[in-house]
C-alpha cells in the first residue's frame, strides 16, 4: 500500500509545507514533489522554518541513514505532532528513508501521522491527495538550491552491502537511470539557468552496469557536458573497488568536468577493510589514489573515513592516521561508527569500542586534517582561480572554485570592491588562507 493512515484524496488542499532532512538525494526527491504540488495548483513552501505560519498540510521527507539522522527525523515528526495537537496543522504526511525502513513500527508509535510513504512510493502522494492529478515527467522539479546550481541524481540503490551500511536495505539494488533521460533533465535544468551540476548516486562507479552491461559513467558525463549552458560538472560518491578508470581522461581533458572527486575510502587497515566488506586492500587503495592523481593533475579528492569500527585496535587507528598524513587529502570528513539495525556488522560484530574512545579518535584525525587543510589552502595564496558566486553576505561575496562542492567544502570570500552577481563566474586572486575559507579579491 502507498500509505498507512487516512486517505487524503479529494480534500481541498491549498497550502503544503515540505520539510527535507538528510542528504542531497533526498533533496532531489523533495524538489520533484514540490514541482508536482505546484503543477496541481497547490501553494508549497520547501524547508520552512519552524514559524507560526505553518501550512495546513506538512510533508516530512525523512532520513534513516545513521542514528543522529534518525533522531532528527523523529524529533521533527514530534515537533509537528505538537503543532497538530494545538490545531495549527491539519495533516502530517511522512515519506523517505526512515519510513521506508520502519513504517510499521512508526505508524504504531506515531498515530498523529496521517499517511506514511517510503523511499519510492511517495510518487503516489499527489494522486492520493488530489482527486484529478496532473502528470508530468518524473525529473521535473522545483529547485531549492541557488538557481545556478543543482544536484543531478543518476541512480538509486546500492549493490555493495558494506558491513556497516543500511542503505541497500533501504534503497534496494542499484538502478541506473538511462543516459537519454538524464540528458533531458540536464536540458530542463539549464533552461532554468543552472550552469553547475553536482552529479550524485550511492555508487557512481557502478553506473550503467545494470542497464548497459558495462560501466558507463564516462559516456554519461561526456554527453552531459555537450548540453548547452553546462559549465561545471562535479562527481560525488564513487566507490573505490571496481573504479571506472575511463572517467579519468574525461576529467583531465574536458574543461567542463571539475577536477574533483568524492570517493569514500572509510579505512586503510587491511583487517578493518576486510571486516567492513569493502572488497579492496590497503595496497589497492594507495594504487588507486596514486593513479587518480597521476592521470588528473591538480585534482582535489574528498573522502570520508570511519573510526571506531568494531574490532578497530589502536594499531589499526594509527595506520589510518599515518594514511591521512601520507595522502594529504584536499577534502576529508570523518565519523564514528554507529551500529545500524540488520546490517552485517550489527548481526556479527559486537560494537565493543567505548564511545569516548571513538570520539577521541575522531577528534584526533580531524585535528590532523585541519592542519593539512590549512597547508593546502595556504598554497593557493597569490594564485588566480575561476569562481562561481553563490550569494552576497554583509561583508563579502561568497563563491566557490571548481574544487568546492556546495555545503561541505571551503568557500571563497571576495572583498566587495565591485558589484558581483550570484550565478556568474569571475576570476579572483587569493590573498589569505584559512583552514576552510579563502579570502580573495576580484581580478580587474
Image: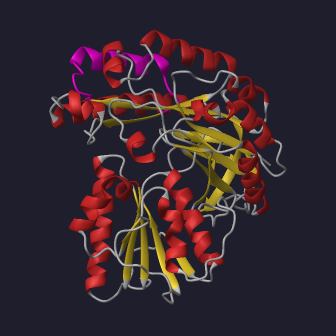
Q: Is residue 312 above or below residue 42?
A: above
Q: Is residue 17 above or below residue 208?
A: below
Q: Residue at x 45, y 46 (%)?
A: 171
Q: How is the image coloured?
A: secondary structure
Say whether residue 428 is visible: no
Query: Relative to 95, is 221 on the left or the right?
Result: right
Which x, y percent locates residue 386?
73, 43
Residue located at (28% from left, 48% from top): 67
Instruction: Find residue 256 and report its image quarter.
Output: top right
Instruction: Using the image as rendered, state which of residue 113 and residue 303 is in the foreground.
Output: 113
Horizontal arrangement in the rendering, residue 101 relative to residue 222 (left or right): left
| Residue sitting nearer the eye, 104 or 59 | 104
At which x and y percent is residue 75? 28, 65
Q: Position of residue 217 (x, y in %)?
A: 68, 33
Left-right relation of 23 to 213: left
Residue depicted at 40% across the width and 68% down the height? 3
Please give the range of residues in magenta: 308-331
Instruction: From this view, report whether residue 411 is shown above or below residue 278.
Output: below
* Residue 432 left/right relative to 387: left
Quadrant in which residue 320 is drawn? top left
Residue 68 seen anywhere in this rendered image of the structure: yes
Instruction: Check if residue 99 falls in the magenta segment.
Output: no
**Could you say where residue 139 lies in the image, as x and y percent from the top left?**
66, 58
Quadrant for the N terminus in the image: bottom left
- The magenta stretch spans residue 319: yes
Q: Residue at x 76, y 43 (%)?
A: 224
Point out the residue furthest to the top here: 283
Amino acid at each position: 500500500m502507498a500509505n498507512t493512515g487516512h486517505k487524503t484524496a479529494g480534500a481541498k488542499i491549498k497550502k503544503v509545507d515540505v520539510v527535507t532532512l538528510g542528504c542531497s538525494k533526498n533533496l532531489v526527491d523533495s524538489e520533484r514533489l514540490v514541482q508536482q504540488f505546484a503543477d496541481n495548483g497547490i501553494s508549497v513552501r520547501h524547508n520552512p522554518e519552524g514559524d507560526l505560519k505553518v501550512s495546513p498540510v506538512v510533508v516530512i521527507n525523512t532520513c534513516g541513514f545513521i542514528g543522529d539522522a534518525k533522531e532528527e527525523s523523529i524529533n521533527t515528526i514530534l515537533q509537528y505532532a505538537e503543532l497538530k495537537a494545538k490545531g495549527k496543522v491539519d495533516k502530517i504526511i511522512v515519506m523517505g528513508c526512515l519510513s521506508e525502513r520502519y513504517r510499521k513500527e512508526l505508524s504504531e508509535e506515531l498515530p498523529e501521522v496521517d499517511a506514511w510513504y517510503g523511499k519510492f512510493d511517495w510518487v503516489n502522494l499527489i494522486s492520493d491527495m488530489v482527486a484529478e492529478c496532473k502528470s508530468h515527467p518524473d525529473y521535473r522539479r522545483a529547485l531549492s538550491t541557488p538557481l545556478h546550481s543543482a544536484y543531478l541524481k543518476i541512480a538509486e540503490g546500492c549493490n555493495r552491502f558494506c558491513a556497516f551500511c543500511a542503505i541497500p536495505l533501504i534503497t534496494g539494488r542499484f538502478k541506473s537511470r538511462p543516459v537519454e533521460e538524464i540528458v533531458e533533465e540536464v536540458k530542463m535544468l539549464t533552461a532554468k539557468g543552472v550552469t553547475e551540476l553536482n552529479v550524485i548516486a550511492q555508487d557512481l562507479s557502478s553506473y550503467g552496469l545494470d542497464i548497459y552491461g558495462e560501466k558507463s559513467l564516462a559516456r554519461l558525463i561526456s554527453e552531459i557536458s555537450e548540453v548547452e549552458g553546462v559549465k561545471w560538472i562535479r562527481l560525488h560518491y564513487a566507490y573505490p573497488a571496481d573504479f571506472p578508470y575511463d572517467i579519468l581522461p574525461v576529467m583531465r581533458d574536458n574543461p567542463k568536468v571539475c577536477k574533483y572527486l568524492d570517493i569514500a575510502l572509510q579505512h586503510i587497515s587491511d583487517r578493518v577493510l576486510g571486516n567492513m566488506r569493502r572488497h579492496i586492500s590497503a595496497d589497492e587503495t594507495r594504487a588507486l589514489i596514486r593513479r587518480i592523481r597521476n592521470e588528473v593533475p591538480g585534482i582535489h579528492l574528498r573522502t570520508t573515513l570511519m573510526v571506531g569500527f568494531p574490532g578497530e585496535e589502536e594499531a589499526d587507528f594509527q595506520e589510518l592516521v599515518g594514511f591521512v598524513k601520507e595522502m594529504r587529502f584536499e577534502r576529508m570528513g570523518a565519523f564514528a561508527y554507529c551500529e545500524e539495525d540488520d546490517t552485517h556488522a550489527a548481526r556479527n560484530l559486537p560494537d565493543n569500542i567505548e564511545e569516548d574512545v571513538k570520539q577521541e579518535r575522531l577528534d584526533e584525525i580531524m585535528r590532523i586534517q585541519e592542519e593539512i587543510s590549512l597547508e593546502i589552502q595556504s598554497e593557493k595564496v597569490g594564485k588566480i582561480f575561476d569562481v562561481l558566486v553563490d550569494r552576497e553576505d554583509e561583508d563579502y561575496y561568497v563563491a566557490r572554485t571548481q574544487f568546492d562542492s556546495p555545503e561541505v567544502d571551503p568557500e571563497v570570500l571576495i572583498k566587495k570592491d565591485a558589484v558581483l552577481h550570484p550565478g556568474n563566474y569571475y576570476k579572483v586572486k587569493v590573498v589569505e588562507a584559512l583552514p576552510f575559507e579563502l579570502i580573495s579579491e576580484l581580478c580587474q
